[in-house]
Image: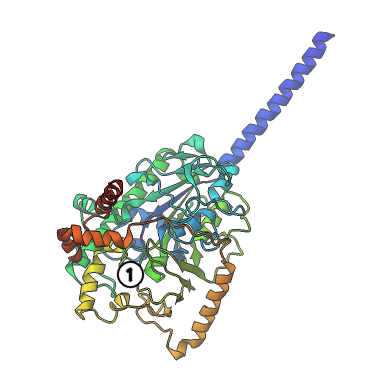
Amino acid sequence: MKYIKFTILSLALITISCKKTTEVVAKKNVTNERPNIIWIMAEDMSTDLETYGMPDVKTPHLNKMASEGIRFDNAFVTNPICSPSRSAMMVGTHQVKTNSHHHRSNRKIPLDTQFKPFTKLLRDAGYTTILGNHAVMKKGRKIDVNFKHKPIGNWDGKTEFGLFDKYDTFEKEDQPFFAQIQLVVTHRGDWWNKVREESKHPVNPKTLTLPPYMADHPAVRLDWAKYLDQIEYMDNEVGMIFKELEDKGMADNTIVIFIGDNGRCNIKGKGYLQDPGLRIPFIMYYPKKFKGAQVRKDVVSATDITASIIDFAGIEVPDYMTGQPIFNKNFDRKFAYGARDLWDEIEEKSRAITSGEWSYIRNDMPEVPYDAQQAYLEFYRPAVHIMRQLYKEGKLNENQKPFFEPTKPKEELYNLKNDPHQLNNLASNIEYKEVLEKLRNKTLELDKQMTPVSSIYKPTSVPGQELVKWFRKEQPEAYKQMKEGVEVGYKKYSSAFKKQLKNKKSK
């Protein structure tokens, strides 16, 4: 009798165990059916790709990605500077609303508890979250967001602030996985000359096409050629990521998203609310759902990409997100809302909206010029030095002068279809009064919607103008080269400056 009872109990336990195993296997299979997602961010670049019609540059891997997926022609970041833009994308919520809109500020302040990084939502849903890639320059691990965080670890927003599970590699056992990979090569850096020197076909500065607001000068042409060389290097990195997916047999079930984290680092680009600063490339590859080349012209904000990733993962998009899933039937964005605030030592406040056809910019601090001579631009924009001198000599034309005027206009209005380079400010033109008022009022409405959740303001200290003053005095030969349009190396001299300050304090 005892034997029979034991047998019945054993059979029951085996049945329960088998049932649980079946449930685990079934759950794993359902999980593995969800797509892997790779989000590639190329740093500091506008729509300067061959697939967007950019002359003088060859980007075969991104051409192929666009020919097999979707190219978005009207995608915009919410801020033209890296850390506020990335803060918005990491939460899916406009950076002004989360009080993460000042560049490299509030780094020790936790996010307001109503917000979560989207990687937390993915992890809770069973995704492995990965930062970087082993094969790209500097391993692509940049995060750079304006709230308390660390790269790897758990997140509860109170005592734990980790954003990702692991670094650099995606494997089959990680599925479903989300990987965020930064392609740093297009960011200004000491590697630009080396990349050009090692290129098998460097871009010819003499034959390239410059935007009409750039001065036609040998140093400006060379700098533009170097930028395009970095883009070609970056395109090869995209090719390597795709090859790794194919080699590991994961290409068919992986969504690949390619964007720029903000606009190009040049005149009117990074740091400014004009088109070269806000408009970014955005290409999506998802072979299971989208076949053949598609082009979408509707307006997309970078926060919409975050919301779309959440949606692809089968997660309900939280109410706090200002982004909308792009492939939802109710997606209908009329305007992208941009903001520019603190950038290093330069206090600023400007707001903008674009409808794709119209661009409106409101400069609340018009007394701060575009050419504010901040240290970052002094070291990293050769065209600024060349054109600044040409401006003093009265040699810039009407398309090139505005960036170097002593003040900014209070309002700017551009018709992007007729004037894609934003050369003709229509804000004072009576014929466009109705358009101006409509966009002005919409911007004020969005200002209210994005009211910051707090007023905490703790910016990171930067050397700024003191570094430039020291450099002029202590490095006269290098300073002379800088004025002639040579990138002399920011890190080298900022390190020397900091070392000198430290030595003074220790005495």
User: In the orientation shown, which residue stands out farthest toward the bottom?
Assistant: 430
Q: How has the structure been colored for display?
A: rainbow
| Residue 259 position in % (x across, y down) | 42, 57
| Residue 179 position in % (x across, y down) | 46, 45
Quadrant of the snapshot with the N terminus = top right
User: In the orientation shown, which residue stands out farthest toward the left?
Assistant: 477
SS assignment at label 1: loop
Q: Nearer the viewer, residue 232 or 217?
A: 217
| Residue 255 position in % (x across, y down) | 48, 50
User: In the orientation shown, which residue stands out farthest toward the front?
Assistant: 507
**Viewed as shown, does residue 214 lie left or right of 62?**
left
| Residue 485 position in % (x across, y down) | 20, 64
Quadrant for residue 214, please give it: bottom left
Can residue 134 be seen here? The reply is: yes
Q: Residue at x 43, y 52 (%)?
A: 144
Vertical arrangement, residue 477 with respect to residue 349, above or below: above
Q: Amino acid at mark 1?
A: Ala
Q: Mark 1 sits on what residue?
A: 372
- Please count the marks in the image: 1
Quadrant for residue 17, please give it: top right
Vertical arrangement, residue 26 with respect to residue 417, above or below: above
Q: Nearer the viewer, residue 331 or 411?
A: 411
Can residue 70 be seen here? The reply is: no
| Classed neighbour count for the residue bearing mark 1: other residues with Cα under 10 Å, few (<14), some (14–19), many (≥20) | some
Q: Nearer the viewer, residue 201 or 157?
A: 157
**Viewed as shown, does residue 140 lie left or right of 484?**
right
Quadrant for residue 292, please give it: bottom left
